[in-house]
Amino acid sequence: MPETTASAPQAQPFRASIMQIEPQWIDYNGHLNMAYYNVMFDRAIDQLWLEFGMGPAYMKERGGSSFTAECHVRYLREIHLGDPVQIFVWLLEADDKRLHTFEEMRHATEGWLSATSENMSLHMDMNARRVAPFPPDIRERIAVVTKAHSAVARPEGIGRNVAMPSKR
């Protein structure tokens, strides 16, 4: 049986479960260490992948998985121990082998934006350990979500690059 939690996608970003920051993730500056933003973003993406049927059972039974090829994180406002976090995911584009996503990490009760992450993920054939096309059933689920997310306003920050501010 497919490993999916899919329901009809809405014209809104995917909402991951509310997450709590673990005490060991707080660094000597008293805030969430930069590495753990990626842990939380990754956990949110894993929840979306389950919607497509691409969880641990997919890898075990069908030999497919996903790898992150590129990631750009922007740290916009500190988040601290005790702050509940919710991540919103937009599936911006997809083709036969790739997924382009954008995530916002927000304070779950106050709503302010803490960080964003833009990613390019690759579908992998884990037996060959090479990039490979999505199976048709997975591709169909991805297409439905991509279409639904195309009707959602795009958040600020998509496609940003890392550069020094221009001098005027």
Image (cartoon, grey):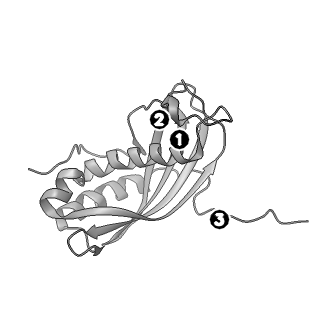
Q: Amino acid at mark 1?
A: Met
| Left/right of residue 77 with respect to residue 142 in the rendered view | right
**Residue at 23% over, 45% down:** 6
| Residue located farthest toward the right when viewing the structure as drawn | 168
Residue 138: % across, % down? 22, 61
Tag 1, which secondary structure? strand
N-term mark: 3 or 2 = 2
Is residue 141 shown above or below 36?
below
Q: State how far apart marks 3 and 1 are (Cα).
A: 19 Å
N-term mark: 3 or 1 = 1
Q: Quadrant of residue 135?
A: bottom left
| Left/right of residue 94 with respect to residue 86 in the rendered view | left
Tag 2, which secondary structure? strand
**Residue at 36% over, 52% down:** 148
Q: Which residue carries the number 3 mark? A: 161
Labels in figure, total: 3
Q: Which residue carries the number 2 mark? A: 86
**Residue at 46% over, 29% down:** 20
Q: Are marks 2 and 1 in contact (CB under 8 Å)?
A: yes
Circle 1 residues within 10 Å: few <14, some 14–19, many ≥20: many
Residue 150: % across, % down? 43, 57
Return the residue nearer the eye: 128 or 101: 128
Q: Which residue carries the number 1 mark? A: 105
**Residue at 16% over, 57% down:** 60
